[in-house]
Amino acid sequence: MKKILRNVLLTAMSIFYVSFLLTGAARAEANNDNRVAFHIQVPSEWEAPCAWAWNEDGTNAFESWPGEELEADELNADWYYIWLPEFANHIIINANSGTVQTEEIIVDAGKESWIQIADDGSVTLLYEAQTVGELREYTAKFEVHAKVDGSWSNPGIWAWSAPDGKNAFESWPGEEMVYSDETGWYTAKVPEWVNSIIINANNGEIQTEDISIDPAEVWVTVDADGKMEYSYIDPDKASVANVKIYVKAPADWNEPCLWAWSAPDGTNVFSNWPGEGFEEDSSGWLVKEIPGWVNSVIVNGNEGSVQTQDISVEAGKDIWLIVNGAEDVQLSYEPIEVSDTQSDAEPVTVDEVAKENVSDTKDSKAVPIAVGGGLIVLAAVGTGVAVSKRKKAS
């Protein structure tokens, strides 16, 4: 094999970003050891159905909406399945890139379940078998992302374990990768025992060399000749410097925390609601340093029981927020004095935030895709714009 170029972007900002990912991965690993099978039957017009799952403490099974795609059940027509962590007892089934969904489904934790979704979206939950045969055993997977030259059409991935030669897919060229308009990357999932991949295209006629990787999410960039570089850090995010969020919170909001994410892809900075607390600087502002790719934040207090609305911010800029109440927030990208908030700060109302979050979505509808338990998301149909909001169940 030719020598592989490892581009790990070991900068200070990358290390900061990785620390968030590792923290989330460690928590996920602790919670995901035991899995339970869920069998799901969806309406025929629901494409690429996914599951989003969490528990009443706000611990999510997946990092970002719409969750994980369901597997087709080969033995039972029109049925899908997914193995979810046994702690997950709140579930939403969604499809069509998260633009259609069920209401929140509360299940008995740890019980194998059968969920039937009618054409009108209503749900029937059963704990008695509605399918036949045994499912494949659960196998953890990780994502492989690829960005290829424009001459490469319909990129695919071939994956295997070396040196034993166990293949992840039945035949060459493997599995076609799925393109995301939001990120500009093609993506596929492979089993965690995979340590070797090839990115190919044009029905396998062109390809990279063998790529030896660790079993972790990886980004591969390929040029027209098949030469590639890869990284275990998202290059689009690791190249952005960290920023600081300065906050003044109401006096009765105990232990204020910050929740932060990237919209519309839904990548969260913190693993669990209500996020992480602030430090206080010498001038009395609460301060938190976060990755510069964040464009959406929520300030909350009292263990997440009180919170602001979603606040859309400009990525890559330091931010000053004065929170007067849940629906009264003032925003500035320049340092401000508390006494001068009316003149220096930009008031943010609920209506203005809503307008900003659905900007450039003319001819679209804002569709509520989860209410209560663990998540509120607004998806703009036809544009892919989504705004995520975590709220702890009362």
Image: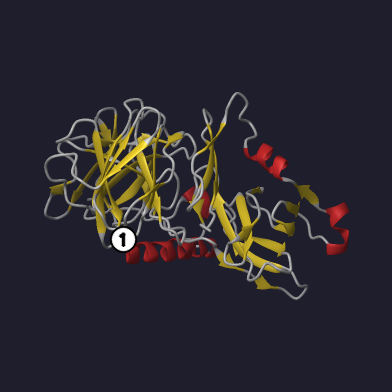
Q: Residue at x 45, y 45 (%)?
A: 65
Viewed as shown, does residue 64 lie left or right of 68?
right
Q: Quadrant of residue 251?
A: bottom right
Q: Residue at x 41, y 30 (%)?
A: 150
Instruction: Answer above or below: position of 75 versus 314.
Output: above
Q: Residue at x 38, y 62 (%)?
A: 25
Q: Position of residue 319 (x, y in %)?
A: 70, 56
Q: Residue at x 28, y 39 (%)?
A: 40
User: Which residue matches tag 1?
Assistant: 32
Question: Observer-nearest residue: 376 or 6?
Answer: 376
Question: Observer-nearest residue: 372 or 376?
Answer: 372
Q: Position of residue 363 (x, y in %)?
A: 60, 23
Q: Quadrant of residue 35?
A: bottom left
Q: Quadrant of residue 281?
A: bottom right
Question: Observer-nearest residue: 240 or 383?
Answer: 383
Instruction: Answer above or below: position of 82 versus 56.
Output: above
Count of number-bearing discs: 1
Q: Position of residue 299 (x, y in %)?
A: 64, 59
Tell me the kind of residue under disc 1. Asn
User: Could one spot residue 222 in this view of the protein?
Assistant: no
Colour style of the rendered protein structure? secondary structure
Helix, strand or loop at label 1? It is loop
Other residues around mark 1 within 10 Å, as few (<14) / some (14–19) / many (≥20): some
Farthest residue in the top direction?
363
User: Could one spot residue 136 in this view of the protein?
Assistant: yes
